[in-house]
Image (tube, helix red, strand yellow):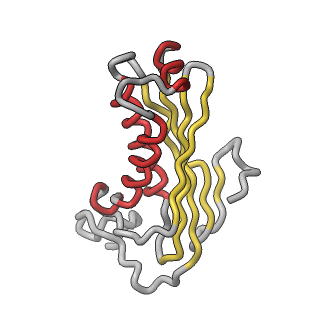
């Protein structure tokens, strides 16, 4: 009896998917998430007056580092030699949105790397600004687009025109 879930074997045990027979292809993924916070915290981050230092520069580096370590953090992910990771931020009303893209020429995708980059970038913002607002809320972390591989092009609703 075979399993329909790629990370579960016929006996119901977790397994890493064998990608040995797959062909390498250019793969790109984009993820995003948001952290809501008080006006005071948002203003301090925008002005660069948070006592711990440059919040967004630190969060950007943390996100990039996290993407490179995804295979160590997520048990069934393959360790990947990522070609590029970019982490960007946008100020919104009462919040900061983080977006991350990851790219690779490989046998498997980089969706988890993009999601991990966003997650750790947002956690880093929380860590650096928590003295100003312990009630910040992280949420909405999701894949918004991917290109490449067997499943090809995919876009989340509302992002159908996003070019990678």
Q: Could you say which quadrant of the image residue 97 lies in?
A: top right
Q: Eyeballing the image, is 129 above or below 8?
A: above
Q: Eyeballing the image, is 89 above or below 15?
A: above
Q: Is residue 92 left or right of residue 122?
A: right
Nearest to the observer: residue 132 or residue 14: 132
Q: Eyeballing the image, is 55 above or below 28?
A: above
Q: Residue at x 54, y 30 (%)?
A: 96
Q: Residue at x 34, y 69 (%)?
A: 79
Residue 17 point in image, percent of width and height = 36, 72
Residue 87 point in image, percent of width and height = 53, 48
Nearest to the observer: residue 77 or residue 51: 51
Q: Residue at x 51, y 32 (%)?
A: 34
Q: Quarter of the image containing the N terminus?
A: bottom left
Q: Could you say which quadrant of the image residue 32 lies in?
A: top right
Q: Is residue 24 left or right of residue 164?
A: left
Count of all numbered marks drawn on residues in the image: 0
Residue 55 point in image, percent of width and height = 44, 33
Q: Residue at x 48, y 63 (%)?
A: 110
Q: Eyeballing the image, is 116 above or below 152?
A: above
Q: Is residue 130 left or right of residue 84?
A: left
Residue 33 point in image, percent of width and height = 51, 38
Q: Could you say which quadrant of the image residue 18 lies in?
A: bottom left
Nearest to the observer: residue 125 or residue 142: 125
Q: Quarter of the image containing the C terminus?
A: bottom right
Q: Is residue 18 left or right of residue 12?
A: right
């Amino acid at each position: 009896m075979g399993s329909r879930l790629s990370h579960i074997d016929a006996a119901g045990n977790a397994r890493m998917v064998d990608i040995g027979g797959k062909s390498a292809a250019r793969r790109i993924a984009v993820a995003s998430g948001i952290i809501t916070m008080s006006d005071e915290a948002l203003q301090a981050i925008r002005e660069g007056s948070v006592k711990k230092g440059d919040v967004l520069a630190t969060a950007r580096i943390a996100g990039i580092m996290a993407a490179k370590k995804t295979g160590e953090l997520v048990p069934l992910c393959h360790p990947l030699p990522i070609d590029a990771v970019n982490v960007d931020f946008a100020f919104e009303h009462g919040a900061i949105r983080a977006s991350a893209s990851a790219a690779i020429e490989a046998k498997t995708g980089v969706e988890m790397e993009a999601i991990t980059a966003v997650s750790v970038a947002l956690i880093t913002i929380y860590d650096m600004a928590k003295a100003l607002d312990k009630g910040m809320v992280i949420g909405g972390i999701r894949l918004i687009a991917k290109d490449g591989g067997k499943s090809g092009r995919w876009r989340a609703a509302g992002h159908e025109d996003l070019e990678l």
